[in-house]
Image: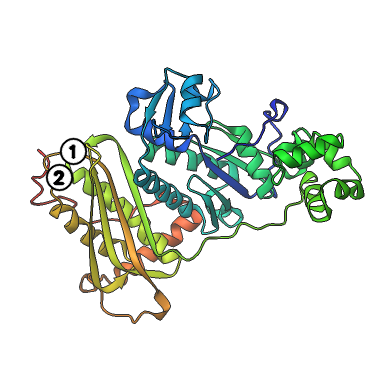
Amino acid sequence: MSRGPRSAAVRRDWGHDEDGASVLHVDMDAFFASVELARRPELRGRPVIVGGRERGVVLAATYEARAYGVRSAMSMTHALRRCPQAIVVPPDHRLYRDVSRSVMAILGDVTAVVEQVSVDEAFLDVAGARRRLGLPTRIGAALRERVRAEHGITCSVGVGRNKLVAKLASTHAKPDGMMLVPAAATEEFLRALPVGALWGVGDKTEQVLARWGITTVAELADTDLDVLQAAVGRVSGAHLHDLAWGRDPRPVVAGRAERSIGAESTFGQDVRDLDEVARRLRELCDRVAGRLRRQGVVARTVALKVRTSDFRTMSRSRTLEVPTDVAQEVYAVARELLVAVDLQGLPVRLVGVRGENLRDRARTTSQPTLFEEEETPGGSRRDAELAVDAVRERFGSAVIALGAPSTTVRGSAGIS
């Protein structure tokens, strides 16, 4: 989440040259509050605060509440004094973690080079995805639309030549926007900012710099390095001087190897037709299997997640005799798990699937798979899915969809 100071002068068009600007910073807008509004749409447009009402602190606030000066980490007493008409919602951390994992999985569909830095923000290096998905701004726009469609929340995206610039760009794109800072415009962009916008400039450092007459990034950049080091120290001075000139050598570092790979989707309206749920589940299994193959792993366990209209979440899983990365096999198991879930007559709000207990495919003994008896002259089902991967790699993920057996769900009287 972005809390640094902003500059009105920065909120403008900096150009359209995307060469060399391959780092994205994706930041959810008022994340906890937005998730709450997604499940309580009647609160949209009203000042909402997420946190404990008694002796609590503000965890998140909608932009309507922020207009009254409510901020994260503020005491609830202080916040309600500023905005007495605010609606206080208790936090649901399990739900926030679920949405966060799903959003990060969406980012992982774009590139494996994703560095999650908090529950609601991450950096992506999309240099390797440009041929497949297009320019960084096109990728950013697609991510924003997908997050909105699947979760009913918004995110802001910054695009720049490095992590520093991308982060500052997303801050100034908020809320629900995207900002590109071309590589050639980096220095001009930074010089328009207050010095407190830079990483490493907290309140104390900002006060020290102010005593030396340095209040903007432009003044910081133009200050002699020896003077700057005398003001804030040798190491900090050199670091801030580099940032002021847009020098940030830190690469986007992908997180640790995933222990599971999943995808989930929230329906625009709660769904009573279980066949429709199964069709969405089929798409998710296709997505998960594709990510398994790209990362060179197979899943020993398939897990299903279903959330009903009353926000009750049910999970079921099954461990396979033979690990797989084949969408049809993942779907066959997930569909059986879906049929076995007792929905108590309620419609479905969300469905998801995960491949768990991941193993390196190269080190896994190959055995006949569930569908090998149905091989065609063209080869196995996995061969067919690999061919689809190759087409998608070249022309985009939307150009082709895998064929599937009938998704009619038998014995699904759980929804009336």
Local secondary structure at mark 1 = loop
Check the image and name the residue furthest to the front: 55
Q: Is residue 135 visible?
A: no
Left or right of residue 79: residue 211: right
Residue drawn where x is 35% and y is 47% of the image: 94
Which x, y percent locates residue 279?
A: 24, 48
**Circle 1 crowding by C-alpha within 10 Å: few under 14, some 14–19, many from 20:** many
Q: How is the image coloured?
A: rainbow
Which x, y percent locates residue 73?
A: 52, 36
Q: Amino acid at mark 1?
A: Pro
* Dots 1, 2 in contact, CB < 8 A: yes
In this rendering, is residue 350 above or below 326? above
In this rendering, is residue 254 above or below 66? below
- Distance from the alpha carbon under mark 1 to that under mark 2: 8 Å
Left or right of residue 257: residue 287: left
Residue located beneath label 2 in the image: 343
Q: Is residue 180 visible?
A: yes
Left or right of residue 36: residue 68: right
Which residue is nearer to you in this view: 252 or 58?
58
Which residue is nearer to you in this view: 405 or 174?
174
Which x, y percent locates residue 205?
A: 75, 42
Q: Which mark is residue 217?
A: none
Location of the C terminus (image quadrant): top left
**Circle 2 crowding by C-alpha within 10 Å: few under 14, some 14–19, many from 20:** many
Location of the N terminus (image quadrant): top right
Residue located beneath label 1 in the image: 347
Residue drawn where x is 24% and y is 69% of the image: 319
Which x, y percent locates residue 246?
A: 76, 46
